[in-house]
Image (cartoon, grey):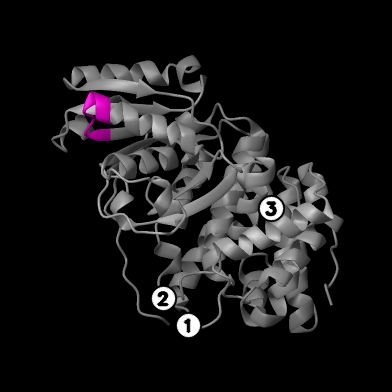
Amino acid sequence: MFDFHYYTPTKVHFGKGMENHTGEYIKETGCRKILLHYGSGSIVRTGLLARIQTSLESAGLAYTELGGVVPNPRLSLVYEGIRLCRQEHVDFILAVGGGSVIDSAKAIAYGVADERDVWDYYAHTRQASACLPVGAVLTIAAAGSEMSNSSVITRDDGMIKRGYNNDICRPVFAVMNPELTMTLPAYQTACGCTDILMHTMERYFTNGGNMGLTDALAEALMRTVMHNAQILTDHPDDYAARAEIMWASSLSHNGLTGCGCDGGDFASHALEHELGGMFDVAHGAGLAAVWGSWARYVYRDCLERFCKFAENVMGISGCGTDGETALAGIAAMEAFYRSIGMPVNLKELGISPSEEQLKTMAHMCSLASGGTKGSAKKLREEDMLCIYRMALSGYTKEAF
């Protein structure tokens, strides 16, 4: 195992009606002027925005609003939020929404605290040293941003999608009422479940030291998400299943399932970021579309972990050689993705990149990764291009 630092300062308020106390939770921080940040009209239609406003007013808190966050949140809106916060002397940012809204709020919080360009952090040319406090009212169980140190922003110019990690952006609190996720379309719920699984698998498929306890937690989390995702395909109003998925979302990305490993692989995320930047696809669906091709490309270099996954998560046994067991586990995971309506290749995702576009994505992925990415197998640009080609062709047999 590797040495590690585990830091999770976020206070969680979990359960029915918790959003009605949001103002009280902010007041505990001593902050007085709030930016209420959200996405489109869904929180208006459901009455959530009105309930949050009432809660803030009841707590005697002043607030200003900025809506308009979209999936793959844009840098242009972050800049607008920074200007608004400075103009209105905002000292706390409240994100009401899913990972895109929370990520946008974190970026704004960085930007308000520093006069220089916030994109520098996402371009990895410097590190943040300050950040306004952020709170989250979660409406989509997916990204885990409500407890994580990460955020992902897309620069409008060139549609470049980049992530940045820093513990100072971890939310002060997260309000989690599973009922708030019941209005989500089935596709969005499935995308969220995929993202949760991928955050766990990125930390699971590694080479080097691992902890048995961490592995057991990760395997239980994956089995739990898969079980409840299938319940929600037929029973979207099942509160218990929604609750299991929502808590798994937070635990999958707050660092817990990576304790003792080398930091994780995250090559599938890097590959998807280029897809999301170029084609603006749903993040979870993009991950599902590249994962199987990535897995078949790297499994030989991480065979023990893939066998363990096949046996302990997918319930595969008696398949012959270790290689056959690993491939059976990969195929079973793809079958699960399809069962909840997720794509397992780029054509199923609805895109058909040209060879030139594939080369551009591979090149940009390599640049963003500093030349190599991965732990299960170190990927270079030529490897990334091969995986994109496999994902485009829908190739489902051994790569070599």
Q: Disc 2 and disc 1: Cα gap in Å?
A: 7 Å
Q: Disc 1 and disc 3: Cα gap in Å?
A: 26 Å
User: For the point 60% across and 38% down, which residue is it?
Assistant: 189
Q: Amino acid at mark 3?
A: Ala
Observer-nearest of 294 and 212 = 294
- Image check: 8 left or right of 375? left
Q: Rate crowding at label 1 as few (under 14), some (14 to 19) or many (20 or more) other CA atoms within 10 Å.
A: few
Q: Is residue 29 above or below residue 319?
A: above
Q: Rate crowding at label 3 as few (under 14), some (14 to 19) or many (20 or more) other CA atoms within 10 Å.
A: many
Q: Label 1's element?
A: loop
Q: Position of residue 86 (x, y in %)?
A: 26, 30
User: For the point 80% across and 49% down, which residue is it?
Assistant: 353
Q: Which residues are magenta?
A: 86-92
Q: Position of residue 60 (x, y in %)?
A: 16, 20
Give the residue pinned by disc 2. Answer: 260
- Image check: 162 left or right of 337? left
User: For the point 77% across and 72% down, which residue is it?
Assistant: 327
Give the residue pinned by disc 1. Answer: 209
Q: Disc 2 and disc 3: Cα gap in Å?
A: 26 Å
Give the residue pinned by disc 3. Answer: 288
Q: Position of residue 71 (x, y in %)?
A: 56, 36
- Image check: 324 left or right of 252? right
Q: Label 3's element?
A: helix
| Residue 316, quarter of the rendered image | bottom right
| Label drawn at residue 350 | none
